[in-house]
Amino acid sequence: MLQVKVIREEKQRIINGLRKRGWSAAQIKVIDHIIGLDEQRRNTQKDLDDALAEGNRLAKSIGQMMAQGQKAEAESLKIEVAALKTRSKTLEEQLNTLKTQLDELLYSVPNIPHKSVPKGKTPEENKVAKDWNKPFPALADKALPHWDLAKQYNLFDFELGVKLTGSGFPVYRGKGARLQRALIQFFLDEAGKAGYEEIMPPLLVNEDTARGTGQLPDKEAQMYKCDLDNLYLIPTAEVPVTNILRDEIVPAKDLPIKMTAYTPCFRREAGAWGAHVRGLNRVHQFDKIEIVQIEHPDRSYKTLQGMIRHVEKLMNKLELPYRILLLCGGDMGFASAKTYDFEVWSGAQKRWLEVSSVSCFETFQSNRMKVRFRDENGKIELVHTLNGSALALARIVAALLENNQTPEGIRIPKVLWKYTGFKMID
């Protein structure tokens, strides 16, 4: 959530940022509405403070008058105090209404893109930050897509998933399940080596948690909700892990705080259909390892580059062709200030598949969650939050299967041998 103070003092920068995201002139009018409501809120707060202060002053005078025997004068002041109490109550109600209205508007405004984010509205306008400049894996002319390989080697079963749950919930079996588990352990081990504390969070979160990282209200339609208990299945470990520090003030010396978590992720993916979402390309439940950092504002973009290097290291160890995209303003997530996407080459499908997003949110999430740090001089400021997929397994599995198929079977990258216990799927 953007800070009202920033919107008020840097209005033109905010408007320019929303234009970079593709917002129309009509949508941008919300900024004036926010500034107007904030002015009303501040004026109402001043009136309330003045009324309370006057009431306190008169109450003291009443005590003095009663002690001096000035009962009539005291009774007169009591009437004024009662009127001030009534006025204060009315002002408090008005203030609460204004705060609610203001928060609703603030929750509807996305983060402002960093100045280095390119303009654009569609994925086609994203900038290639790092391209793959080596040959793609040499595959046979009749190389199979991963969904056919899964049937041939009995690795995962979509039909069984439909029977048990519904479309988009694959059941992994045999070596497919072991490969899945091997990747999870490999990614967690690599995160541990990089200094991330491992977290095992709940898979269900409440509204405050989902709102804190920006999933609510923006992505409510994409989340699975348990209505009876008013809880949400997490779309990513980012949600519970980042909220661990909600309403906390941490010493500056403790930054950065680095956390990682493996969780299943649940996404409705409403409206997704077509050949591009076949097989593991788009599922409703998938496994992912997330890395999260809580960082000092002065270092957050340097930290972002470090997180990118961490994901690159994983891709290289898995021997997968990849490229890195810097997302344009119109293609970024609601809460992000700057995002890099990693895409892996799918040999049989001959297309790029997104497998990771690494983002800096600046103070957008921390302002919602009230995650702050205290510097050496005692000043309290909002931290910057960052996170990244390291990595999302479904499409990584798809790419590993397709890119490593041979006449003898599917070759397993060497780095995974100690985790899988096998070198080939045959």
Image: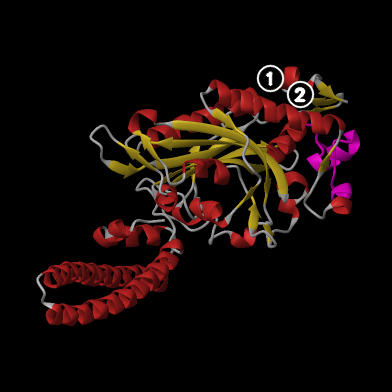
State the image coordinates of residue 243 (x, y, percent, origin top left): 51, 45
Graded by Cα atoms within 10 Å as few (under 14), some (14 to 19) or many (20 or more), the crowding at tag 1 reads: some
Q: Which residues are magenta?
A: 137-161
Q: Is residue 339 positioned above or below 20 on the image?
A: above
Q: Which residue is mark 1?
A: 415
Please state, as top left, top right, bottom left or bottom right, where the C terminus lies in the image. top right
Residue that badge 2 annotates = 412
Quadrant for residue 116, please give it.
top left
Point out the image quarter for the N terminus.
Answer: bottom left
Say which residue appears at 40% left-offset and 49% top-offset: 370
Residue 51 is a magenta residue: no
Residue 312 sits above or below residue 325 on the image:
above
On screen, 195 above or below 87? Answer: above
Q: Is residue 76 visible?
A: yes
Residue at the location (35% across, 33% down)?
251
Looking at the rendered structure, the kind of residue marked 1 is Val
Q: Which mark is residue 135?
A: none
Residue drawn 9% across and 71% down? 68
Please state which of residues 235 and 159 is positioned toward the viewer in this rendering. Answer: 235
The answer to whether residue 84 is left or right of residue 105 is left
Q: Given the image, on which type of amino acid does mark 2 rest? A: Ile
- Magenta-drawn stretch contains 155: yes
Tell whether 169 sits left or right of 69. right
Q: Is residue 149 left or right of residue 118?
A: right
User: From this viewpoint, is residue 137 visible?
Assistant: no
